[in-house]
Image (cartoon, rainbow, N blue to C red):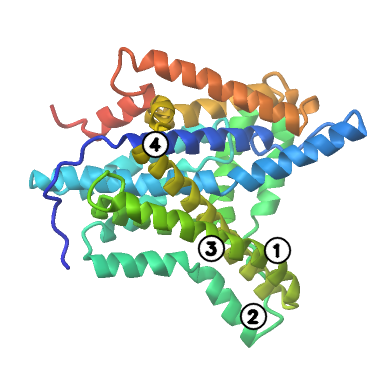
Amino acid sequence: MSYAPSLKPNTRIDVADILRGIAIGGIVLIHFIEHLNFYLFPEPSTPFMATLNQNVWDTTFFLLAGKMYAIFSMLFGLSFFIQHDNQAQLGVDFRPRFLWRMVLLMMFGLFDLLFYNGDILTLYAVCGVLVVPFVRANNRVLVAATILFALQPVEIAYIIMGLIDPTTTSLNLGSGALFKAILPAQAEGSIVDVAIKGIQNGFPVNFLWAIEHGRFTQTIFLFLLGIYLGRRRLFYDEGNNVAIWKRVLVGSLCAFAVLFPLYKVVPNMIDTPCIKESVKVMLNMWKNFAMMLFYVSGVVVLFYRTTAKNFLIKIAPYGKMSLTNYLSQSIIGGFVFYNWGLGLYKYSGHTSSLMLGVLCVALQYLFCRWWLKSHSHGPFEALWRKLTWIDKR
């Protein structure tokens, strides 16, 4: 089947805004418990606090880490499809405009790096460019590419190399050393020191770490998946879409029930370091993806088929301003934890850091509700939109 513009209008998808809000909120909580990539924590005051902190850390990462990012990435691909399809219906090729949009996203990411060295926007900008050739591919090509990147081709290559030569070392591009070099600026430096290290070290660290840990290929996979789901219009309450999501709900839960124990057991059964690490990366990504699908399908079914819709719709304003919330959490979090601000990394353990994250999300949410009463877009969303169409009336 060849690509053709949709015959139906792409109206605003409330459930996508809700999912985007859940994702960005979860990302903020993960970042705060990590002290925004600043892994220095005070000693627990009592054995009870030590146990509580560890349980909070383990539970937060189990529920959110990798899953919220996956939702956010998939919805990025969905948004790309909608923007492209809307223009295609008017006879306009959106691809050149999208490439310019990725240049702008790279600039937003560089701004983010001034405050937080774990920025994902720069990675999104590069991966966004790489998926452009697929947005008009026929469904077979799109599905094939999606499956290819889902299989983690870099890890497969290293497994093959390890089978051929067991002395092959695991993929290591040096992100760890670059990351450690950032810590002194966070612990002792000024905001200028943090900004310099964010650009100097944070920029390459994000790409190198993403390649080392399968995140680079996973991001491309999720972008492509979002495009495909957009083509299928699966986020609309049309036809048997909800029935499909119900099957996904059950299937993803079963997949996670299998993949999670495999992730815990299989790597420990492998002696070759190269193969062991690659298998661990693959299984980690797949089990996170299964859990992400469980979250997404659950929210879709609840929204379209239960009274939970009345509660879930309240999350939408937070999702509509996801770019603003993502950038502002970097500034707020840097001020809260780094030396140039309050320096609370010295006093805030996992539990209190998570509570600070909850407070940040709550304040952002209130701001979103207030802002959207008089504006159609968030501040950074409006700027991105205006610059995207800078040469148009």
Residue 231's place in the image compared with 68, above or below, is below
Assess disc 1: are there few (<14), some (14-19) or many (≥20) residues with their C-alpha within 10 Å of its C-alpha: few
Q: In the image, what residue occupies the spot 80% across and 24% down?
A: 347
- Name the one closer to the observer, 170 or 11: 11
Give yes or no for contact between labels 3 and 2 (Cβ–Cβ under 8 Å): no
Which badge, 4 or 1, comes first in the chain's sequence? 1
Estimate the spatial distance between the alpha carbons at disc 1 and disc 2, rounded to whole Å. 21 Å
Q: Is residue 206 left or right of residue 217?
A: right
Task: Identify which residue is drawn at 41% across, 59% down.
Answer: 221
231 left or right of 290? left
* Mark 2, secondary structure of its residue: helix
Residue 336 image point, x, y percent: 66, 22
Q: Which residue bears the numbered disc 1?
A: 264
Distance of mark 4 from mark 1, alpha carbons?
A: 35 Å
Q: Which residue is mark 2?
A: 162
- Alpha carbon of mark 4 to alpha carbon of mark 3: how far? 25 Å
Image location (x, y in percent) of residue 261: 67, 64
Q: Nearer the viewer, mark 4 or mark 3?
A: 4
Q: How far is mark 1 from mark 3, CA to CA?
A: 14 Å
**Which of pointers 4 and 3 lies earlier in the amino acid sequence?**
3
Residue annotated with mark 3: 255
The span from disc 2 to disc 4 (Cα, nearest Å) is: 50 Å
- The label nearer to you, 1 versus 2, is 1
**SS category of the residue bearing label 1:** helix
Q: Please say if 60 is above or below 355.
A: below
Q: Secondary structure at mark 4?
A: loop
